[in-house]
Amino acid sequence: MYLFEHEQKGKKLIRNSYLSVFILSLLLGLYLFFTDYGLGMQFITRGTISVLFHIVVFYFAIKNKQWALFFIKVNVLLLIIMLIVAIIALMFGR
């Protein structure tokens, strides 16, 4: 099914937004894990596996593979839920 030009631009903008937030979530996750464990062996192992997994998913998402796009959308949704829970926890002082 063909889309109008403005519909294509809208879908591309949403897709690029998801990809950007996905990369930011990777960097945030690495930063938080680094601040918890430092540069120990656990950080190097888990950080490397995490980065490789995110790179593979990102590569296939750029190729418009549906499973990778689904994974990115789920990851972004979970990140939003975590941020909402963190804000609520800060409001109630826990």
Image (spheres, grey):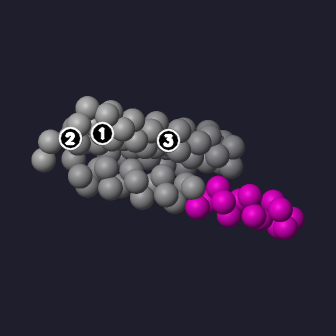
Separation of marks 3 and 1 at Cα, in angstroms: 21 Å
Instruction: Find disc 1 in the rendering and name its residue.
Output: 7
Does residue 65 appear in this view?
Answer: yes
Separation of marks 1 and 2 at Cα, in angstroms: 6 Å
Which quadrant of the figure contains the C terminus? Answer: bottom right
Q: Which residues are magenta?
A: 81-94
What's under tag 3, amino acid-wise? Answer: Val
Question: Is there a contact, CB below 8 Å, between mark 3 and mark 2?
Answer: no
Instruction: Find disc 3 in the rendering and name its residue.
Output: 21
> Which of 32 and 13 lies nearest the eye of the viewer?
13
Crowding at dot 2, Cα within 10 Å, few <14 / some 14-19 / many 20+, comes out as few
In the rendered image, which quarter is residue 16 located in?
top left
Q: Is residue 90 magenta?
A: yes
Q: Is residue 40 left or right of residue 92?
A: left
What's under tag 2, amino acid-wise? Answer: Leu
**12 shown above or below 29:** above
Question: Is there a contact, CB below 8 Å, between mark 1 and mark 2?
Answer: yes
Q: Name the residue: 57% across, 46% down.
A: 29
Magenta part, dominant SS = helix
Which structural element holds mark 2?
A: loop
Which structural element holds mark 1?
A: helix
Crowding at dot 3, Cα within 10 Å, few <14 / some 14-19 / many 20+, comes out as some
**88 shown above or below 23:** below
Q: Name the residue: 69% across, 43% down.
A: 35
User: Which numbered disc flags the more N-terminal residue, 3 or 2?
Assistant: 2
Does residue 12 appear in this view?
Answer: no
